[in-house]
Image (cartoon, helix red, strand yellow):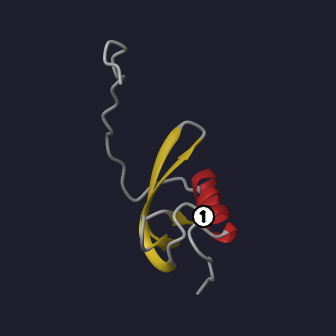
Amino acid sequence: MHKYGDCSFCGGEVKDERVELDYRYKGELYIFREVPAGVCQQCGEKYLTAKVAREIERRIQTKGKWDKTIPIPVDVFPERVTV
């Protein structure tokens, strides 16, 4: 169990959970399941320890065959739509 402190965005309580994490590395998207993380109980912000972040990057760099791959649709938002 890790002590994360309060959320740096909203000040909410951060608790240990296992989460699904979208992780971008060198322009690629990776999805990890059952990642140990701190999750703000108020806003949902996720926090990783340095050890978990290093393990994610190690797995990306060394894993030859992934458990599953999925196609992801990508679209560029048109410039004609303004705020």
Tell me which residue sits at (30%, 34%) in the image. 73
Q: Is residue 74 left or right of residue 64?
A: left
Tell me which residue sits at (55%, 60%) in the image. 9
> Where's residue 13, x and y in %?
51, 78
Quarter of image, res 11? bottom right
Q: Is residue 44 left or right of residue 51?
A: left
Which residue does the numbered mark 1 point to in the structure image?
Answer: 8
Q: Amino acid at mark 1?
A: Ser
> Where's residue 70, x and y in %?
32, 46
Q: Quadrant of the C terminus?
A: top left
> Where's residue 1, x and y in %?
58, 87
Viewer-side residue, 78 vs 61: 78
Q: Is residue 20 left or right of residue 14?
A: left
Q: Is residue 82 visible?
A: yes
Q: Secondary structure at mark 1?
A: loop
Q: Residue furthest bottom?
A: 1
Q: Height in image: 58 above or below 81?
A: below
Q: Residues within 10 Å of mark 1 (few under 14, many from 20)?
A: few
> Where's residue 12, x and y in %?
50, 73
Q: Height in image: 82 above or below 56?
A: above
Tell me which residue sits at (36%, 55%) in the image. 68
